[in-house]
Image (tube, rainbow, N blue to C red):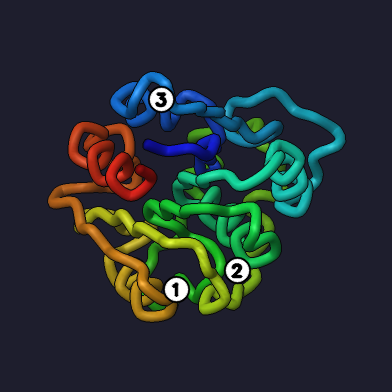
Amino acid sequence: MAMAKILFLPGAGASPDFWKPVGALLPADWSKEYFGWPGLGDQPHDPAIKGIDDLVRMVAAKMDGPVDLVAQSMGGGIATRLAIEQPRNVRRLVLTVTSAGIDMAGLGASDWRESYRKSFPHAMPWITESRAAALLPVEQIAAPTLLLWGDADPISPVAVGRHLEQRISGARLHVVRGGDHDLAQTHAAEIAPLIERHLA
């Protein structure tokens, strides 16, 4: 039984509803908090949020003791930073189709920025201005890590998951057949039991 609060972090789509299909399949008595990212996706703007560093601080402010981080895409970059910077406060980690902290283009990832701008024309410009996220020393992650990837995701291909599995000590990779970048929603029934076992 998970004893830590679970913080669910979406990707650049930013909706706090993104992880709710998975959360609804996890035990009802587990403590869950769903984040949205101000100014990204269709979320209301907040002048205090000017970049990723502010989102990292926003999540850190809710970490009142060890937590479990369950994160998708860009949210995985935030979770990875927190796992590296605050190892005592991250009990377990779930990274899903993460697209931050490593050389994505070098692993065959497609560029998502143009389609993102079309989908979310009012999102803050900073999210697509950075050509590459800062590389992170993922080898420093101490939290037990579950990696969830889809085999039909051009934004974060399976090669990225395999790369992280090799670099993060003890990490386990599960590949979802037919899973795209939104596999946490489309394949919630498949991945929720994996997440539950990992966090229990």
Say which element carries label 1: helix
Q: Amino acid at mark 3?
A: Lys
Where residue 85 sits in the image (x, y, percent)? Answer: 70, 64
Say which element carries label 2: loop
Q: Amino acid at mark 2?
A: Ala
Q: Residue at x 38, y 28 (%)?
A: 23
Mark identifier at residue 132: 2
Circle nearer the N terminus (2, 3): 3
Please state, as top left, top right, bottom left or bottom right, where the C terminus lies in the image. top left
Circle nearer the N terminus (2, 1): 1
Q: Which residue is mark 3?
A: 20
How far apart marks 2 and 1 lie (CA) works out to 9 Å
**Are the residues flagged by discs 2 and 1 in contact, CB closer than 8 Å?**
yes
The image quarter in which residue 144 lies:
bottom left
Where residue 97 sits in the image (x, y, percent)? Answer: 38, 55
**Are the residues flagged by discs 2 and 3 in contact, CB closer than 8 Å?**
no
How far apart marks 2 and 3 lie (CA) works out to 29 Å
Where residue 6 sits in the image (x, y, percent)? Answer: 51, 37
Q: Which residue is mark 1?
A: 105
Where residue 81 sits in the image (x, y, percent)? Answer: 63, 61
Circle nearer the N terminus (1, 3): 3
Q: Amino acid at mark 1?
A: Ala
